Image (cartoon, rainbow, N blue to C red):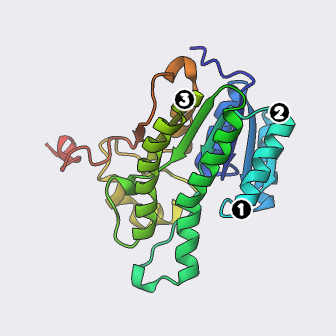
Amino acid sequence: MDLGLKDKVVVITGGSQGIGKAAGLEFAKEGCRVCVCARRQEKLDAAKAEFEALGYELFTMKADVTKPEELQALAEAAAKQYGRIDVWLNNAGVNQYKKVVDYEYDDLMRIIHTNLVSVIIGSKIAAEHMRETGGGVILNASSYSAVTPIAGKAPYAACKSGVLSLTRSLAAEFAPYKIRVNAYIPGLIRTEISQTNIERFGDSMVRDIPMKRFGEPEDLAKSIVFLASDLAAGYINGVALEISGAKRCVQNPWYAYEN
């Protein structure tokens, strides 16, 4: 299927590893011009080398999404490099297992600013560029924690729930500018961040998934690219696509394997 994405300019926050990098590579395969940011230069350099080894260009920029001026600089650099911004993925996120009573204020603010405030600011910046060039697509990373919160990750889950509400609001606010806004909800995806918990609790965690396996970043990448396509998903707006292998779609997801 022709997704009509050739030469589209895609900006991905937190795009040097995991889901963001996999999505960037899938966009590159569609002929897009991909720009990513991350906080660590060595991760950006490694991602750039990986893309180039596969024959794809990757524009990288070191940026901290909790700093609005750095998000603004990212957008301006991408637009200067390629002339416009067509797709913006608010993908960057941080997580921490800790009881709320044990949080220091600075750690709490880091969770909130990375997972929610940066999505608001990033969306605003992206929309300002897109409305000058006739529209675009904004995609926001939520989490299964927004579907079923987790004790020990309360601030993270609250932020990701906020992302779902924000996505619906922005879909309505940005529609006059021909900007679609959707979210994606990853289930248990095997990434650098989740690997430790998978190693510790994998058997119990996979029991909740009828497909009996963890997701890989590539499982999300094609769905993210689909949502970005006006040809394939042009009437999809203000929704959240769950990509979780049917995690907890029923109360007893193991039933069919044991009966």
Q: Residue at x 41, y 49 (%)?
A: 165
Give the label on residue 6, or none: none
Residue 47 versus residue 63 in the image, above or below: above
Q: Given contact means CB atoms under 8 Å apart, are the residues at marks 2 and 3 in contact?
A: no
Write down the quadrant of residue 135 in the picture.
top right
Residue 133 versus residue 253 in the image, above or below: above
Question: Spatial distance from mark 1 to mark 2, Cα to Cα?
Answer: 22 Å
Q: Secondary structure at mark 3?
A: helix
Residue 189 versus residue 229 in the image, above or below: below
Query: Type of residue at label 2?
Result: Tyr
Residue 207 versus residue 57 in the image, above or below: below
Query: Type of residue at label 3?
Result: Pro
Indicate the quadrant containing the N terminus: top left, top right, bottom left or bottom right: top right
Question: Spatial distance from mark 2 to mark 3, Cα to Cα?
Answer: 24 Å
Q: Is residue 114 left or right of residue 72?
A: left
Between discs 2 and 3, the one toward the N terminus: 2
Residue 219 locus on image (x, y percent) = 50, 38
Residue 102 locus on image (x, y percent) = 44, 85
- The one of 252 and 249 positioned closer to us in this rendering: 249
Query: Type of residue at label 1?
Result: Asp
Q: Residue at x 61, y 43 (%)?
A: 89
Judging by the rendered image, the residue that carries numbered circle 2 is 82
Judging by the rendered image, the residue that carries numbered circle 1 is 64
Can residue 58 be seen by looking at this rendering? no
Judging by the rendered image, the residue that carries numbered circle 3 is 176
Report crowding for label 2: few under 14, some 14 to 19, many 20 or more residues within 10 A (C-alpha). Answer: some
Report crowding for label 1: few under 14, some 14 to 19, many 20 or more residues within 10 A (C-alpha). Answer: many
Eye-nearest disc, 2 or 3:
3
